[in-house]
Amino acid sequence: MSFRFEGYVIVSADGMLADASHVMPDSLKFEGDKLFFEQALDRAGLIVHGRHSHEGQPNSSKRKRLILTRRSKALTVDPEVPNATLWNPAHASFEEACAFADVTSGTVAIIGGPDVFDMFMDRYDTFWLSEAPRVRLPGGEGCFVGVPARTPHEVLAAHGMTRGSPFVLDAAHDVTVTPWRRAG
Ligand SMILES: NC(=O)c1ccc[n+]([C@@H]2O[C@H](COP(=O)([O-])OP(=O)(O)OC[C@H]3O[C@@H](n4cnc5c(N)ncnc54)[C@H](OP(=O)(O)O)[C@@H]3O)[C@@H](O)[C@H]2O)c1
C-alpha cells in the first residue's frame, strides 16, 4: 500500500474548528474555502473522519470513507452512509481498514475532528490549514489536541511540518489556506 496523506481544516484566529457546543458555526463557513475543500475531496481516493465530521457535500455519497467510531469493534460496512466503512482503530490498523474498504493507493484526506487529526500527525505529507483571522470562538473546540495551549502552527511545526506560501480563499474576510509540508 502506498498513500499520500493530506489534512484539511479551517480554524478561527484562536485555533478553533468548532464553537463551545462542538458545532462548526456559520461564521467559520466561507464560499472560497468550501470550494477549495470540495475540489480537494473530489481528488482524494479515501476520506477519513470521526463520527461528527462528515463533510455533507453534493459528491459525498460517491466518496470512499473510513468513519472512526468506538461503537463497533469489527470493521463494518456502514449501513447508513454510502461507501463508508466503520473503523475502530483500537481493533484494526489503518492498513486493515483500507484493505477492507478495497483502497490500496492514492491520496487520503483526513478531515477531523481533533483526535483524528492527531492520529495522523506524523504521517501528513501536506496539511492544508485554512485560517479565518477575523473570527474568534472563545471556549471553542481546538483544531488539534493541545490547542489553544499551543497554536496550530506550533503543533504542525512540532511534527516536522514547514509553512508554505498562503493562498487567498476569501479576500473580503482575509481567509487564506497555507500548505504545511513535511520537510524532506
Ligand atoms: N472547522 C473545520 O474545518 C472542521 C473540521 C472537522 C470537524 N469540524 C467540526 O468540529 C466538530 C468535531 O466534532 P468532534 O470533536 O466530536 O470530532 P469527530 O472526530 O468528528 O467525532 C468524534 C467521534 O468520532 C469517533 N472517534 C474519534 N476519534 C476516535 C478514535 N480514536 N477511535 C474511535 N472513534 C473515534 C467517536 O465516535 P463514537 O461516538 O461513535 O465512538 C467520537 O465520539 C464538529 O462540529 C465538526 O463539524 C470542523
Image (cartoon, grey):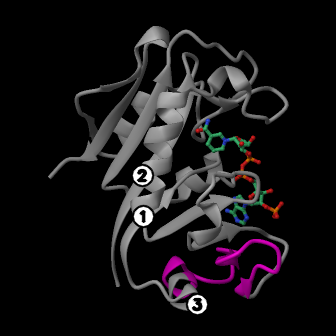
Q: Is residue 108 above or below residue 152?
A: below
Image quarter in which the N terminus is found: bottom left
In the picture, the disc for residue 44 is 1
Q: Secondary structure at mark 3?
A: helix
User: Disc 1 vs disc 2: Cβ atoms closer than 8 Å?
Assistant: yes
The residue at which mark 2 appears reads as 40
Task: Give, as a three-letter code, the residue at label 2.
Answer: Ala
Q: Is mark 3 within 8 Å of ligand 1?
A: no
Tell me the number on the disc at residue 100. Answer: 3
Range drawn in magenta: 75-97
Tell me which amino acid carries mark 1. Answer: Ala
Q: Tell me residue 62's x, y (percent).
A: 58, 70
Is residue 179 rendered magenta in the image?
A: no
Image location of residue 53, percent across then percent down: 69, 51
Residue 145: name its quadrant. Answer: top right
CA–CA distance between discs 1 and 2?
7 Å
- Asked which quadrant contains residue 68, the reply is bottom right
Image point 76% across, 79% down: which residue? 78
Give 45 or 117, whichever is nearer the viewer: 45
* Element type where label 1 sits in the image: loop
Q: Is residue 29 above or below residue 2?
A: above
| Amino acid type of the residue that numbered disc 3 sits on in the rendered structure | Phe
User: Is tag 2's residue or tag 3's residue first in the polypeptide sequence?
Assistant: 2
Closer to us: 31 or 167: 31
Query: Percent from the top left, x then y, of residue 41?
Result: 47, 56
Label 2 secondary element: helix
